[in-house]
Image (cartoon, helix red, strand yellow):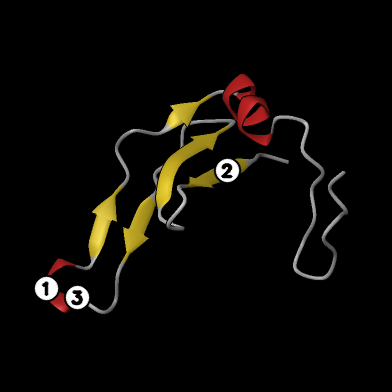
């Protein structure tokens, strides 16, 4: 399975995107009709980039959030 990470800043805005392989990423803001689609141009590519972002943290989902000690 190929992976993509979206790393957010303290305000919840996307700060960095990493992917195992080269992909095209588009950010869509439907609230601004004349300026709604942006292509993310600074994608970091490679499994090592994704591993670095995940950093060994436990992985949860919307139904389960692991306890952080």
Q: Residues within 10 Å of mark 2 (few under 14, many from 20)?
A: some
Alpha-carbon span between mark 2 and mark 3 = 25 Å
Q: Depth-wise, is mark 1 or mark 3 nearer the camera?
A: 3
Residue 46: x and y, percent? 56, 23
| Residue shown at 30% from the left, 69% from the top | 29
Farthest top residue?
48
Percent coordinates x, y for residue 52 in the rendering: 63, 25
Q: Which of 69 and 34 is in front in this view?
A: 69
The answer to whether marks 2 and 1 mark residues whose Cβ atoms lie closer than 8 Å is no
Label 2 close to label 3 by CB (< 8 Å): no
- Percent position (x, y) of residue 49? 57, 24
- Find residue 60 and name its label: none
The image quadrant of residue 37 is bottom left
Q: Please say if 19 is above or below 37.
A: above
Are the residues flagged by discs 1 and 3 in contact, CB closer than 8 Å?
A: yes
Residue 32, label in figure: 3
Report how far apart the C-alphas of labels 2 and 1 lie in the structure: 28 Å
Which residue is label 1 attached to?
A: 34
In the rendering, at what x and y percent does residue 15 appear? 41, 43
Helix, strand or loop at mark 2: strand
Q: Quadrant of the C terminus?
A: top right
Disc 1, SS: helix
Q: How crowded is mark 3: few (under 14 residues within 10 Å), some or many (20 or more)?
A: few
Residue 55 horizontal side relative to residue 30, left or right: right
Name the residue rendered at 45%, 28% in the picture: 44
Between disc 2 and disc 3, whose residue precedes? 2
30 sits left or right of 54 in the view: left
Q: Mark 2 points at which residue?
A: 5
Say which residue appears at 66% left-offset and 39% top-offset: 2
How many dots with numbers?
A: 3
Label 1: how many Cα within 10 Å (few below 14, some 14–19, many 20+): few
């Amino acid at each position: 399975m190929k992976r993509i990470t979206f790393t957010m800043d303290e305000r919840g805005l996307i700060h960095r995107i990493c992917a195992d392989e080269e992909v095209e990423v588009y950010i869509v803001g439907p609230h601004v009709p004349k300026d709604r689609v942006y292509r993310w141009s600074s994608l970091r590519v490679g499994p090592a980039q994704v591993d670095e972002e995940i950093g060994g943290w436990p992985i949860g989902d919307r139904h389960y959030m692991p306890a952080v000690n």
